Image: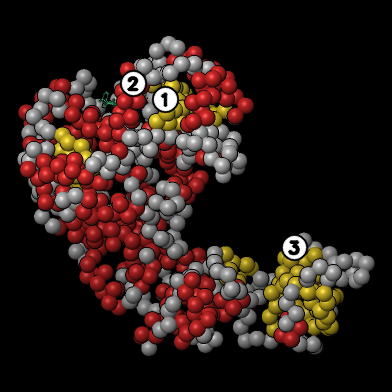
């Protein structure tokens, strides 16, 4: 019997190849898959009321005997079937649209259970109430499935009806659920008083009561998190179990470097630097996430870590998600190391091939110690150089695939992954369970909070009039637009081009504005940023390319057009480009939020300057998928658990997984359940 859960769905009565193809769209190919296709909702159809008590406007479940049936065609295109049902209290008409065959399945004189929305009938022709497109089921059945119970509603694709699908699941559960074997450790099952797996699956689909359902749900959510955590921790163990490279900072060099800075490290920076230095020294690969709000000073930390690699005579890579950031950081690092004999090189995708090859060779030959670049770095032979350290900056800007590749590609190199999108702890544990985390919790002194305003488009003139006055006094401003050129599809988007003419024509005559976006070539980009830095250009109109890495303290004002179109974390990042000096800065969000949710998001940004608070809010309002951008979130696909809602269970699951790992039983456990059941890949 054991293998029957892995049998194809066609082994179930009533499923032929056509059905199987439809089910495949739902990723249901084996009997077992039915169990884990969880309901998206439930309807309580337990209470059967007398027909006379069915109230228009409400959903009701009644029992009635078929009296007469009629199908007719309306003047329009509808076929209407009307069947009258009676009970001792009264009569009601069941109405079906375009389902003439229903008359064949309902037999005259027989009793049925009907459930659906009740409406006031058409008064002139017949005064009976109607129940529209009701679910119907014969009264004399052994076990009612579609009525008289809590009925599961499934996420489905076209072609499959709830009714048909429910019957399949019912059959699968009845015939096969008992074959499910419990895989959670007995200790855990006892501790949390979890039901057996077969019972839980039964309850989640065809629950009999609240309590049973609740327990089943808890158990399944826990199981999902538990496996996820075990996997993460196992992969962490695998990485850390392999020999790494010990990189040791040279105290003299470090001191010399710190002395060239015109500031002291903050306490938070010192703390994370110690954590990182200690980790790099260890004889095992480092896998560390450094998170810190925009402007918290992560670059210096990266520079210190890179310097430790240099001191240990190992090449190092510094990888940025955009060419602009790579170019900026290349200049920054060169400047930071100006008194240290450490050679920095730049490699980006838009460089000519020979140049790229040349840089890679220089790294291999030891002529370059630190190579800064975009992911173009990874197309080269960097592995041959056996980098001691790889720093990945703004890692959230890389796609999921890239990110996984980056983390995996490091082999036994030390890896320092940095992000300014603070990841709420609940997510960090899940997403980055294989990484250790260091957090810079404090901004450098002297930073002033950026005052933030939300304004509608009607205030635009006023906003830019004010901006023009500010830049007249040696200040700089950013204007962020969602697109470069006007968009035909979405005309309400402000483009950089339009913005430049609007500003030049109305407020800032002459050549004090410039447009910056990712499609400009590196020389142009560099020239524009240099002019902006020097003050020749006063207003930088840009797409979100400036989101990361642009560090120009004189900029004290930012206006973001169509702000409701950006993610909250992204807006926070953008805003982080100002407020970098002692003068007060402000940020104006021009937006016409179409929804209440949109409005709340902007409010959240206005009321907090703390990236962590904003990230938590964003997560609350939009959910984890949206939080990371639907395409790129890289979250595990959870079938029943929800990272927002089920934080408590996530914590418990994590703790239990840790205990198993600590007892050295993790791999055993995973192997055992892998062999016994294919549950694992299925659930996660
Ligand atoms: P981020 O964490 O966003 O990458 P950066 O590393 O770009 O931030 O730092 C932002 C700015 O703060 C830079 O101009 C940097 O020189 C400055 N900075 C970093 N650390 C300190 C500090 N301890 N004191 C004062 N300024 C600092
Ligand atoms: Mg940075």
Up/down of 536 relative to 121, above or below:
above
Asked if disc 2 and disc 1 are in contact, CB closer than 8 Å, the reply is yes
**What residue is at 85 percent from the left and 75 percent from the top?**
90
**What residue is at 35 percent from the left and 59 percent from the top?**
653
Mark seen at residue 514 = 1
Residue 482, visible in the rendered structure: no
Mark seen at residue 58 = 3
* 178, 353: nearer the viewer: 353
Up/down of 518 relative to 188, above or below:
above
Relative to 289, 207 lies left or right: right
Asked if disc 3 and disc 2 are in contact, CB closer than 8 Å, the reply is no
Residue 446: quarter of image:
top left
Where is ligand 1, by quadrant?
top left
Answer yes or no: disc 3 within 8 Å of ligand 1: no
Q: What whole-number distance in Å separates the C-alpha atoms at marks 2 and 1? A: 9 Å
Within 10 Å of disc 1 (Cα), the crowding (few <14, some 14-19, many 20+) is: some
**What residue is at 53 percent from the left and 33 percent from the top?**
494
Relative to 648, 337 lies left or right: left
* 37, 348: nearer the viewer: 348
Up/down of 23 relative to 415, above or below:
below
Q: What whole-number distance in Å separates the C-alpha atoms at marks 3 and 2? A: 68 Å
Indicate the secondary structure of the residue bearing disc 1: strand
* 499, 482: nearer the viewer: 499
Q: Which residue is mark 2?
A: 531
- Indicate the position of residue 119 as horizontal and vertical percent values: 80, 65
Q: Residue furthest right?
A: 124
Indicate the secondary structure of the residue bearing disc 3: loop
**What residue is at 27 percent from the left and 77 percent from the top?**
675
């Amino acid at each position: 019997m054991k293998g029957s859960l892995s049998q194809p769905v066609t082994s179930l009565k009533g499923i032929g190849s056509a059905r199987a193809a439809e089910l495949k769209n739902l990723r249901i190919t084996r009997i077992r898959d039915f169990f884990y296709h969880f309901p998206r909702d439930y309807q309580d159809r337990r209470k059967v009321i007398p027909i006379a008590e069915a109230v228009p406007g409400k959903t009701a479940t009644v029992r009635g005997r078929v009296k007469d049936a009629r199908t007719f065609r309306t003047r329009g295109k509808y076929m209407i079937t009307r069947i009258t049902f009676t009970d001792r209290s009264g009569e009601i008409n069941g109405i079906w649209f375009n389902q003439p065959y229903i008359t064949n399945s309902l037999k005259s004189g027989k009793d049925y259970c009907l459930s659906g929305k009740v409406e006031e009938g058409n008064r002139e022709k017949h005064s009976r109430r109607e129940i529209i497109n009701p679910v119907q089921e014969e009264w004399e059945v052994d076990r009612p499935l579609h009525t008289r119970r809590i009925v599961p509603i499934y996420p489905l694709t076209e072609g499959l009806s709830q009714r048909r699908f429910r019957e399949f699941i019912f059959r699968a559960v009845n015939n096969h659920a008992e074959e499910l074997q419990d895989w959670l450790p007995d200790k855990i099952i006892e501790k949390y008083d979890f039901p057996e797996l077969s019972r839980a699956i039964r309850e989640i689909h065809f629950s009999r009561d609240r309590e049973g359902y609740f327990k089943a749900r808890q158990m399944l959510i826990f199981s999902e998190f538990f496996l996820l955590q075990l996997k993460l921790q196992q992969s962490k163990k695998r990485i850390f179990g392999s020999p790494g490279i010990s990189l040791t900072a040279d105290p003299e060099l470090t001191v010399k470097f710190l002395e060239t800075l015109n500031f002291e490290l903050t306490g938070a920076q010192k703390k994370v630097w110690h954590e990182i230095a200690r980790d790099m020294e260890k004889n095992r690969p480092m896998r560390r996430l450094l998170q810190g709000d925009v402007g918290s000073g992560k670059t210096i930390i990266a520079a210190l870590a890179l310097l430790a690699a240099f001191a240990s005579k190992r090449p190092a890579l510094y990888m940025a998600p955009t060419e602009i950031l790579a170019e900026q950081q290349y200049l920054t690092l060169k400047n930071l190391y100006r008194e240290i004999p450490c050679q920095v090189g730049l490699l980006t995708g838009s460089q000519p091939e020979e140049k790229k090859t040349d840089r890679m060779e220089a790294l291999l030959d030891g002529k370059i110690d630190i190579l800064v670049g975009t992911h173009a770095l990874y197309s080269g032979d960097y592995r041959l150089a056996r980098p001691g350290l790889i720093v990945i900056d703004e890692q959230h800007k890389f796609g999921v695939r890239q990110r996984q590749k980056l983390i995996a590609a490091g082999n036994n190199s030390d890896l320092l992954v940095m992000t300014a999108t603070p990841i709420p702890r609940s997510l960090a544990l899940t997403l980055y369970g294989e990484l250790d985390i260091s957090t810079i919790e404090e901004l450098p002194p002297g930073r002033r909070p950026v005052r933030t305003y939300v304004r509608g488009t009607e205030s635009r003139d006023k906003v830019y009039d004010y901006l023009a006055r500010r830049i007249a006094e040696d200040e700089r401003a950013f204007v962020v637009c969602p697109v470069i050129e006007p968009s035909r599809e979405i005309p309400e988007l402000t483009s950089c081009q339009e913005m430049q003419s609007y500003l030049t024509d109305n407020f800032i005559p002459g050549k004090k504005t410039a447009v910056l976006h990712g499609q400009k070539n590196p020389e142009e980009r560099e020239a524009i940023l240099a002019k902006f830095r020097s003050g020749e250009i006063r207003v930088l109109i840009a797409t979100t390319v400036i989101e990361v890495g642009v560090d120009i303290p004189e900029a004290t004002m930012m206006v973001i057009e169509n702000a409701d179109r950006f993610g909250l974390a992204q807006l926070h990042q953008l805003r982080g480009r100002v407020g970098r000096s002692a003068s007060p800065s402000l940020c104006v969000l021009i937006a016409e939020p179409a929804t209440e949710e949109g409005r709340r998001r902007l409010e959240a940004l206005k009321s907090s300057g703390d990236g962590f608070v904003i990230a938590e809010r964003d997560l609350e309002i939009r959910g984890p998928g949206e939080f990371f951008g639907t395409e790129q979130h890289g979250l595990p696909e959870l079938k029943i658990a929800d990272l927002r809602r089920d934080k408590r269970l996530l914590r418990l699951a994590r703790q239990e997984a840790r205990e198993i790992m600590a007892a050295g039983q993790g791999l055993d456990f995973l192997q055992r359940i892998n062999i016994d059941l294919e549950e694992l890949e299925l659930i996660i």
